[in-house]
Image (cartoon, rainbow, N blue to C red):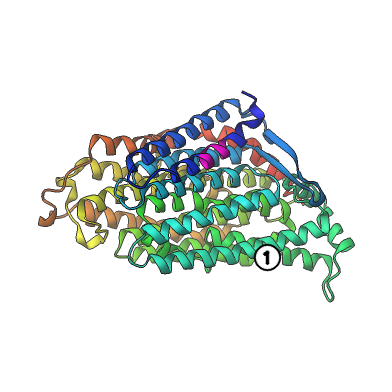
Amino acid sequence: MNQSILLTLLTVVPFLGAVLVAAVPTDRSLLARRIALAVTGFAFVLTGAIWISFDATSGAVQLVHRFEWIPTLHVDYFVGIDGLGLVMIGLTSLVLPMAMLASRRVTENIPMYYALLLFLQAGLYGTFTALNFFHWFLFWELTLIPAFFLIKFWGGPLRSGAAIQFFVYTMVGSIALLVGFLGLYLATGTFDFIQLAELARTGGVQKAIAARINWPGMDAEQVYSLMAVGVLFGFAVKVPMVPFHSWLPLTYSQAPTPVTMVLTGVMSKMGVYGLLRLFLPIFPHAIDSFMTILLWLAIATVVLSAGAALVQTDLKRMFAYSSINHLGYCLLGIFAAAHSGGDVAGLVQEKAAVLNGVVLQMFNHGITAAALFCFLVYLEDRSGGKTGIGEFGGLRKVAPVFCGLMGISLFASLGLPGLNGFVGEFLIFKGVFALSAWAAVLALPGLLVTAVFILTVMQKVFHGPLNAEWKSLPDLTNRERLIVLPATALMFVVGLFPGLLVQIINPTVIRLTEGLRF
């Protein structure tokens, strides 16, 4: 097979699969499910082929497939991956099959449900491989549509409000993002991410703005900063960053739990990915100009979301706030790494450590969070949909395998050494302490509060006297154990051998840090 079409094929396969599944009659639900699983399984195999074809020693974009699409607008069909993109398509290929396998409780309009999941998978692959803004933005928006309908038609009692809130928040962010990049296009004449990053590295973006955009009362630096704010807002909503986070707890709690697995496991990473792929390389000077504000917002995202998780009485809402908390560490690392430090060798190394930690945190949190919500699927199956923390107790006595495996995911989320959650957080804080010690110190309470609410869950749900209502609660079946086994194994593999991923990520990170020397 021609390797240059692997990434295109990766996106086309789930898209065509979605069309096929949507055409299955509603009374043939088993057939629809089998086709969807076969398609996502084939996408997993393609991801494996891409992984094998990837040169881990190079930080350059690889497996490029490019041709002119709309020449008059300088729009190319341009896909390719580096270490960052490879990790993200790998995460997508792991979480989507897991979510589909955990969707057995879905009983209404099953073909459309699986078709929308496949459409969402296609959009995610496109987002993580496209390198031209016009092309990339189509996929960015494509993920919004199936997610909206999955929440609205298969969600909880407040699903309509949650779906609308999710759509409005993310659409407003997308509009701000689009406006910022249209301004860049008017100034530079290109939508190409690589060209824009090179222009930014040499100061060419500001020169282009000065030459081609004349806004009364604003110089080129001010226009550049305004564009940066628009782009940052678009990604901040997606992550989400405090104070643009209020859509997430309702959305995660009302979405079908398998869909929440995708929302937290992959879709929330789109915002962090955008910051690394677009914002950090193109707007490093703008970031540095309002660094203090951004660091305070990252600290608030870490600490306030952890505090909000601590007071929740529902497991889905607690894990929703926990997701904000963990992605807050990524924001903290990205903003700290953008701080100017010139070519000082020590600071360059710390920036590399931070950004390696951010990418690891994205992958690790995606696996861990998806696994935690998968365990909530199992709990809902057995309890009639209950997820209140106070409604359980003593489950370890009747479901030791369930509690043991979920306990591993909880400890990974807590950041226990030896499990995957520790590595990314360690690298982030190691680098942030060197780059901005005050921000690292102020963010540390987030780690403590995270430990408190996770241990509280384990104490109230797993231990203590057994709630009589659950004395006959069945333990995990062999099939359910197999669904979570790959994620559980990865928690140990990445925790004990993080170099397996770091060797793929680091060349890309080194290339990214070269653009931050100013």
Tell me the kind of residue under disc 1: Val
Q: Is residue 3 above or below residue 112?
A: above
Horizontal and vertical percent position of residue 7: 61, 35
Residue range of the region highlighted in magenta in the rendering: 10-16
- The residue depicted at 49 percent of the width and 29 percent of the height is 45
Between residues 79 and 321, which one lies in front from this camera angle? 79
- The residue depicted at 35 percent of the width and 63 percent of the height is 310
In this orientation, does residue 433 appear? Answer: no
Horizontal and vertical percent position of residue 343: 75, 46
Residue 426 lies left or right of residue 212; in this view the side is left
Horizontal and vertical percent position of residue 170: 55, 63
Give the structural element (helix, strand or loop) at label 1: helix
Q: Is residue 504 above or below residue 408?
A: above
- The residue depicted at 24 percent of the width and 34 percent of the height is 478
Q: Tell me the quarter of the picture where residue 399 sits.
A: top left
Question: Which secondary structure type mostly characterizes the magenta part of the structure?
Answer: helix
Q: Is residue 13 magenta?
A: yes
Residue at the extreme right: 211
Quickly name the residue at label 1.
Answer: 229
Residue 221 lies left or right of residue 464; in this view the side is right
Residue at the extreme bottom: 217
Residue 209 lies left or right of residue 130; in this view the side is right
In this orientation, does residue 20 appear? Answer: yes
Q: Is residue 232 magenta?
A: no
* Quadrant (top left/top right/bottom left/bottom right) for the N terminus: top right
Residue at the extreme top: 1
Horizontal and vertical percent position of residue 290: 68, 65
Q: Is residue 172 above or below residue 147?
A: below
Report how many numbered discs are placed on residues in the image.
1
Q: Residues within 10 Å of mark 1 (few under 14, many from 20)?
A: many
Between residues 265 and 119, which one lies in front from this camera angle? 119
